[in-house]
Amino acid sequence: MRIVDVITVVIVDAERAFSQALAYRLNAEPLFNVIETAGTPAAGEEAVARLHPNVAVLDASLWPEGVLTAANRLCTSHPGLRLVVLSSVADTQSACDAVRARASAFLAKDSSVDELIAAIRGAMHGETRVDPCLLTRVLRELRYEGASSADGDRVHGLTPRERDVLDCMTAGLDRAAIARELVLSINTVRTHTRRILAKLGTHSSLEAVSVARRTRVGLRPIDHKMTPDPAPGGPPSALVSWRYLRGS
């Protein structure tokens, strides 16, 4: 995970009013600097190559070849880039493709500005966020992909403490809740998460949870009383904690 004083952002969206409004709101925050907006895929990819932003915010509908191909190309060409993908439709396939392509977030385009800001900030902290209305379907889709005995072997290769952390991740606890549950520091939880991802051969905690759910290896129940209460008017705490989902 990179530590930066200012998160530089490129926004790629055909709706100029949306791009300008989001750029204005982000630039009002000391942590963000929107260095360019673009209205086409070509202009967006050129801006990313030229300016090397920390985060690119992409409208999934702009790329005719699909978000998987576009995100894979961007992440491969710019390994340090974090992607926040927005969609105007609740499309499970596109959400799964974004996760497979290592995008840091897949959110509805009509998400609140605060949610978008949290997603961009979270991307720099190694988090993955999936729109709550799609999360269950995305997990189900990834769960049934490519299950094999190798998955079980990799899970069995985790240390007991790493298995404890994976159990908590599978129960939907975020980093802070895992730290409380296991009496660890958040930095220690982050270190265990990185090791879990490496040993399971996954790019994100969402994929790691999918492996654990496919194998059903040694998963124990977690006391959900440890999970923080949701914000007033927000989604249930299980959905809030799932938004943790990318160890780094």
Image: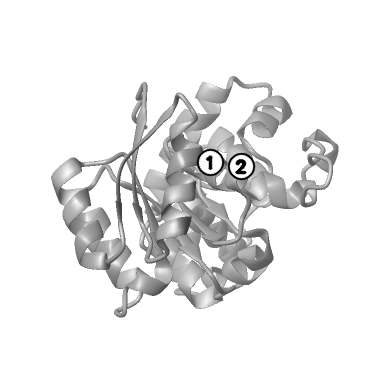
Q: Residue at x 63, y 72 (%)?
A: 137
Front-most of 124 and 116?
116
**Residue at far bottom of view:** 64
Q: Residue at x 42, y 50 (%)?
A: 20
Residue 4 placement (x, y as % from top left): 35, 25
* Residue type of the residue flagged with mark 2: Asp
Label ID, residue 29: none
Secondary structure of the residue carrying numbered label 2: helix
Residue 229 placement (x, y as % from top left): 82, 38
Query: Image check: 181 left or right of 70?
Result: right
Query: Image check: 169 left or right of 31?
Result: right
Front-most of 11 and 220?
11
Question: Quadrant location of residue 169?
Answer: top right
Residue 29 placement (x, y as % from top left): 49, 29
Where 51 falls versus 68 (above or below)? above
Query: Image check: 116 left or right of 239?
Result: left
* Residue type of the residue flagged with mark 1: Ile
Residue 154 placement (x, y as % from top left): 44, 54
Q: Quick one: quadrant of the C terminus?
A: top left
Secondary structure of the residue carrying numbered label 1: helix
Label 2 to label 1: alpha-carbon separation: 5 Å
Q: Quick one: quadrant of the N terminus?
A: top left
- Asked if labels 1 and 2 touch by Cβ distance under 8 angstroms, the answer is yes
Label ID, residue 117: 1
Q: Residue at x 49, y 33 (%)?
A: 192
